[in-house]
Image (cartoon, rainbow, N blue to C red):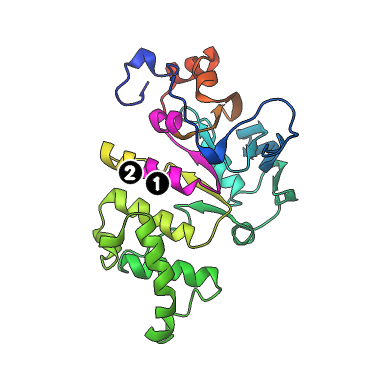
Amino acid sequence: MPRPSGQPREDCFAVRDTARTRGYRVKYKGASTGVGRRRVADYILETENLTKEFRGFIAVNNVSLKVKRHTIHALIGPNGAGKTTCFNLLTKFLDPTRGRIVYKGRDITAAKPADIARQGLVRSFQISAVFPHLSVLENVRVALQRKRGDSFDFWRSESVLDAYNDRALELIEWVGLAEYAATVAVELPYGRKRALEIATTLALEPEMMLLDEPTAGMGHEDVGRIAALIKRVAQGRTVLMVEHNLSVVADLSDTITVLARGEVLAEGDYAAVSKNPDVVQAYMGAGHG
């Protein structure tokens, strides 16, 4: 079973004692009354008995999620756990066989992908089919045009399109790509492409971001850079991510949902799920993916 970098195999789910106290993500226990306390049930995204069958094969089975507003929520599990299918259901690229999806109190089970994106629920790396032969600046500018309903105005004069430049450059600097603004996307290092994808997602002004394996295939340096960027992105937003790197999951996540064979196996913070014997067995008995 793969493990967080720097940890021995048998200690893959060792409890970490690092306490992360981020001002915008303070948790309160007990009653929800009192100045400055967030309502306990302030969920931005919920699913109820979400199920997806493919010709008799149940890929996702009765999955009920509750994602709290302004938190980072990770979805993990071994290969075949149903994580990608679940993500595709949440972003409406698949329709559920049964169950409901509620976003900001509104049932979006029958909604289309474009509809939920307009409501602020955006999946990064889905919209980011970055244009490989456009520059970083041009890619972000296209995303800004899309947000304003002008996605296909490529024929407009350069002076009109330049109106997007200030905001595009601001986003590019924010994700650490200022020196690459004029670089063609295909020439970017892999980790920098992921940063560009996050910039194009931010251009759509999401209230909630779904990140699909944001650090997959990266070297150690890029993993650290993207993890730090995700932490910045989460300030004032909600993030739901599928992630394979357990070190990243442990460092970033407020809540972790573990899937196995399409069902919720466990849920809680890293300390709780790492000690769950069913979770340990799922990772020991199956490939990690």
In this view, 195 is above or below 218: below
Q: Is residue 288 left or right of residue 44?
A: left
User: Label 1: which residue?
Assistant: 229
Q: Nearer the viewer, residue 280 or 35?
A: 35
What is the x, y in percent for residue 139? 38, 66
Residue beneath the point at 41% across and 67% down: 168
User: Label 2: which residue?
Assistant: 225
Element carrying mark 1: helix
Quarter where residue 44 is shown? top right
Quarter where residue 82 is shown? top right
Quarter where residue 111 is shown? bottom right
In this view, 273 is above or below 156: above
Q: Is residue 217 visible?
A: no
Distance from Cα at disc 2 to Cα at disc 1? 6 Å
Q: Amino acid at mark 1?
A: Leu
Looking at the rendering, in which quadrant would you find the N terminus?
top left
Tell me whether the residue at label 2 lies in contact with that at label 1, contact meaning CB atoms closer than 8 angstroms: yes
